Image (cartoon, grey):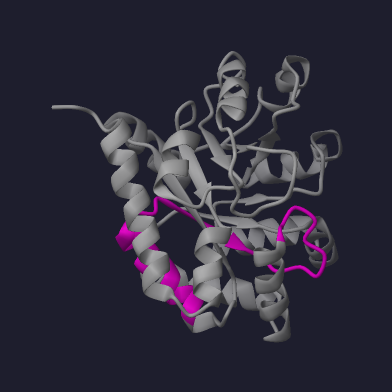
């Protein structure tokens, strides 16, 4: 499998850089802002866009992204409209796009149809947090057949025995959840997930991206210590929902600078 995401992560590794995944809820506060945020986030230093596909019961998301999802759904956001957003993004950007959604929507749509339609529109993969690895076998087969990544997860509680299953066939990236909870900015000791990342390296060469809780350049640097990338969601979405677009982009830029200063190749 060779996708935009694979190429981006390989390029970052070759350059000695850490990646930044920026989560943006599709259609919140509106479609125009979503498209503008993708365009400007890339300019500010984002390497990958995680496009949130709103659902009424987003079990992995905290209050900020829950509110953004409610807003998008009230605006009439559907998977068909999200397809149009992906197509619009592809008119101006080749940045890797990873969807983040819940199986209820995809099951209703038809999972294979979801993969083929979103792949054709320009999406590179999907994160489905409410389907455990043990129940995703058929989904993984469908995704593999279409060169479409299905993210695997590791958490502070993941044992090495479980990693042998979840990591061995992982593609694109592995989502490393920093804490036992939901999304949202909070103070976290990232050394815990760092140790889990170190163990995961025994089982996979697939890039590791740490998410949950990252709200500042300092937190991004800490989260990236043992990983290949960081995932930032609530801190950006909150600013977009509050109408503080420039602040959201400035935060991304500050994280890019901090990561490059901490981990960039020295001359």
Q: Quadrant of residue 261?
A: top left
User: From which residue to which does the magenta span run?
Assistant: 33-62
Residue at x 37%, y 65% (from the top left corner): 249
Q: Point out the residue furthest to the front here.
A: 187
Residue at 39 percent of width and 69 percent of height:
247
Q: Position of residue 205 (x, y in %)?
A: 52, 22
Rendered image quadrant of residue 169: top right
Residue 59 spot, x, y in % from top left: 80, 56
Residue sitting at x 56%, y 38%: 210
Residue 21 lies, with reference to residue 249, above or below; the image says above
Decide: is 22 above or below 12.
below
Residue at 79 percent of width and 35 percent of height: 133
- Residue toward you, 226 or 175: 226
Can residue 79 be seen at all in this image of the molecule?
Answer: no
Whether residue 115 is in magenta: the answer is no
Q: Position of residue 112 (x, y in %)?
A: 75, 55
Residue 42 inside the magenta-drawn segment: yes
């Amino acid at each position: 499998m060779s996708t935009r995401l694979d190429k981006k992560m390989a390029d970052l590794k070759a350059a000695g850089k850490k990646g930044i995944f920026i989560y943006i809820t599709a259609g919140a506060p509106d479609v125009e802002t979503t498209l503008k945020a993708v365009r400007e986030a890339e300019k500010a230093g984002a390497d990958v866009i995680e496009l949130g596909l709103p659902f009424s019961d987003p079990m992995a998301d905290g209050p900020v992204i829950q509110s953004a999802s409610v807003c998008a759904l009230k605006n009439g956001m559907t998977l068909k409209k999200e397809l149009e957003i992906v197509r619009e993004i592809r008119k101006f950007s080749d940045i890797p796009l990873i969807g983040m959604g819940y199986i209820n929507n995809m099951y209703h749509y038809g999972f294979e149809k979801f993969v083929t339609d979103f792949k054709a529109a320009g999406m590179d993969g999907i994160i489905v947090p409410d389907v455990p690895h043990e129940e995703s076998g058929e989904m993984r087969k469908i995704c593999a057949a279409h060169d479409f990544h299905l993210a695997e997860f590791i958490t502070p509680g993941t044992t090495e025995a479980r990693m042998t299953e979840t990591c061995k066939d992982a593609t694109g990236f592995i989502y490393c959840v920093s804490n036992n909870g939901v999304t949202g900015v909070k103070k976290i000791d990232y050394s815990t997930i760092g140790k889990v990342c170190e163990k995961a390296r025994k089982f996979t060469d697939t890039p590791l991206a740490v998410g949950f809780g990252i709200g500042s350049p300092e937190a991004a640097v800490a989260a990236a210590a043992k990983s290949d990338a960081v995932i930032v969601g609530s801190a950006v979405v909150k600013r977009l929902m509050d109408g503080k677009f420039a602040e959201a982009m400035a935060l991304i830029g500050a994280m890019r600078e901090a990561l490059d200063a901490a981990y960039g190749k020295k001359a």
